[in-house]
Amino acid sequence: MLNPEDLGKLARALDMTREDEIGCDECFEQLDRFVETELADLDAAVAMPLVQDHLEKCGDCREEYEALLRALRAEQGSTSVSLIWARLRRLFGAD
Ligand SMILES: [Zn+2]
């Protein structure tokens, strides 16, 4: 069973890297907006593909993303446990 870490390595191994990919610094800079986009029920992966791309490859940034997502959800006061689990399952590719 592949975990996201392995998938990231696999993606690299398959040479899916692009010239316009971003690094951790840029990812962190855009992470707020990415999470807010997601919380607004918009498709953040489509709106900000480079961040999505980096999150798929970088475990550190993904952890940061998940922590931020949880924090903002809690802040919104609209946290639905089932929704979080659904998203986490999607993030970890359990589907
Ligand atoms: Zn990173």
Image: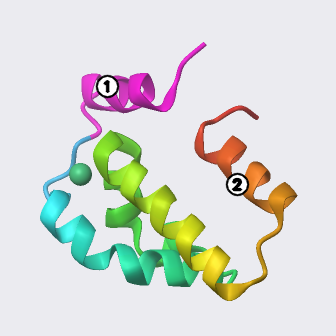
SS at mark 2 in the image: helix
Residue shown at 36% from the left, 73% from the top:
31
Residue shown at 47% from the left, 68% from the top:
68
Residue range highlighted in magenta: 1-16
The amino acid pointed to by label 1 is Lys
Please tell me whether residue 90 is drawn above or below residue 52 in the rendered image.
above
Q: Position of residue 66 (x, y in %)?
A: 50, 57
Q: Which residue is mark 1?
A: 9
Residue 90: say if magenta. Answer: no
Q: Which residue is mark 2?
A: 87
Q: Position of residue 91 (x, y in %)?
A: 60, 46
Left or right: residue 3 versus residue 63 is right
The picture quadrant where one finds residue 92 is: top right
Mark 2: C-beta under 8 Å from nearest atom of ligand 1: no
Disc nearest the viewer among 2 and 1? 2
Q: Total marks drawn?
A: 2
